[in-house]
Amino acid sequence: MQTLILISWAIVGLLACWSFSLLVRGVSEVLARKRTHLDARRSTRALMMGFVLMVVCAGVALLAGWAAVYLEPLYNNGNTPLATPLVVIGASVSLFAACLVVWGAIGDRARGRARCPKCWYDMSGATGLQCPECGRTAKDETKFTKARRPRWAFAVALVLVVPGVYSIMVSKRVIEFGAFGAVPTWFLMMGWERLPEPWIYDNYVVPPVYGCLTDRLDEEWTSDARLARFRAKLIRPMVSSKEARWDPKRLFILDEFYSSEEFESKLHSIENTDKIFVGVATDVFEAITASNRTPLDNIIISTAVNSWNTEGGYYGTRSWFLQQNGFSDPDDFLLTSPRTAQTRRLISDLLQSLRERMENVNIPGLLIHDNNGIAACAQLIVLDTGLMNEFIYSYLDKINTATDRQQLNYAISIGMSLESVSQETQNGVFGLLKEWVESGDDSERFLALKTIRIFQHMAEARDDYDNPAYHQLMKSVLDFAYLDIRTTKSGSTDERSSNSEAAQAVAYHDTEGTIAFPLFRSLLIKECHAPYLYLSQMENKLAAQLWLNYFTEFADSPDPTVRLWVIRSTPSWMEDNSSSNSDKALNEKLNQFAADFLSDPDEGVAVAAQYKLIDRDAEHLIPQSND
């Protein structure tokens, strides 16, 4: 049946071309009849028969196309790109065009007849070289035996061969994206600024066309050379144009580029990354310090703080600059934090001119501005210009009188900034956080723990972090916070307990579980609040073994919340699974431990066990009935 479908599409292509050819011939014959100096080559009856045959061919082509479309979903066995309707039609049209070229090249040969080379008047009885019909004078008698080649045949062949070959070229893309896949990618690249947004990208307002430009930014659909040219076209204006640096459509397209490994591997080819980043930082500074903000200033403030995952903007252009200068960490979050002294110095040196402009600006007022966007942008600029050491206490001076939401924002800002200040300033802040942790105020304790967790993430501060004040702070967390099960509003609709935040901080600090696991076990034994843990930083062999030693007994707890905590916290460690028998045995033990929860009477625990086995690549242990 698949063969019949392909034959139907071949019939569609050939009969459609034949019908078009008959139309061209009929029109040519009608025009010839209107000229007095030409004789019609065909009778009126033949002309009418030609038009009838044209209609019949068109009708049969439509019928065959309808049959193919109807049968395709019923008997489709998974077409390959070389056996699709579009390829068959394209090949048929191209073959017909080739036949027209051959027929036109052969033409109507003279076969001994003498004819005018212009109007093809019979010159058999004429004398001389001048045509009595049109007045054309031939150069010699050999011109009278010239073959008559219809030029229209070559024109029609050209008209047919272009779409025929193109349909073969885009058939695979049409299969994946539908009819819109036939639109050339180069056309979308040329018109990305003027074409409708759904044709270009997903703006999260109007659904994009399937197969839009951002869907095609892949080497499978577009050559590396074309991608490089288009990328350069997008980036080049950002050096000098403020509007280009913050054009939402441009940034969305660059975001798609950045999400591909191909783009990241070619960041070195981007020119003037230093100028682009300085321009972006200057735009942000001018926007937050402007007395009368323009609509573009508001866009800059919003984009700079909300485009964590968007290439371009503040975070993206800074990552271009850092990566082009050899600083690249695949685990870093768009390089939003200058992890080392070298990156901090590199960025602050680049923004030296901006730092000088900030001397006459009320920086503390911007850092604690009521507009969260302005405050976040100010923090970016202060961090990257190296001035946070002078202004971090602006948050601490304001935090006690702020609203709940503002307090949380200030705590996050302090945690993000601590890594970039001097050790002396760090020690002062750690001392104050230590006082908050040891105080009986649940709000202060919660804010201190939130600040500690943000700092740990930004500075990768674990048990080997080189600052005694940090280790004294973590000792206070262990001594005072882990039993605090009071809930505190975290600035949003949810509530979190201090011991949950303390547990996360301890788990991040103690990567092997030697301190954290006994602590959490004691919480479970005392039937205190069991904090949910994100143990990705503890995925190592020692931590996995210790976890089994400390928590296996709680699998039989009568409390479903405890059992849920146990299965969710089960390590996902699988590294070096095949390197040694001991590693393999440990992972098999963890798999079996998780599989035992599949029959738990609590549905939530059983479902969590399924997800844990999937996370551990042990789906084979999930029975079909539980799948």
Image (spheres, rainbow, N blue to C red):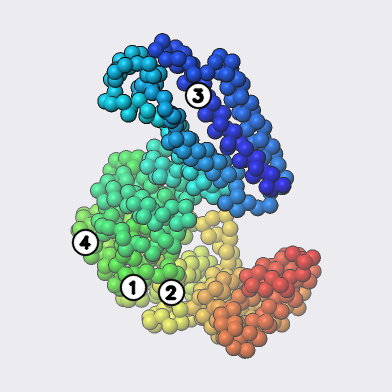
Q: Is residue 603 left or right of residue 547?
A: right
Please tell me whether mark 2 sits on a helix, a strand or a loop.
loop
Q: Where residue 222 appears, x then y in whole percent? A: 43, 52
Please state the horizontal and vertical placement of residue 147, each as a whole percent of the image: 40, 30
Mark closer to the chain start, 2 or 3: 3
Residue at the spot 34% in from the left edge and 42% down from the top edge: 296
Q: Which mark is residue 136?
A: none
How far separated are the C-alphas under marks 2 and 3? 79 Å
Eyeballing the image, is 182 above or below 612?
Answer: above
Q: Are marks 4 and 1 in contact (CB under 8 Å)?
A: no
Q: Which residue is mark 3?
A: 25
Residue nearer the viewer, 187 or 103: 103
Q: Which residue is the site of mark 2?
A: 460
| Residue 214 seen anywhere in this rendered image of the structure | yes
Are discs 4 and 3 less than 8 Å apart at CB?
no
Q: Secondary structure at mark 4?
A: helix
What whole-number distance in Å separates the C-alpha atoms at marks 3 and 1?
Answer: 77 Å
Q: Neighbour class for label 2 at 10 Å: few (<14), some, many (≥20)?
A: some
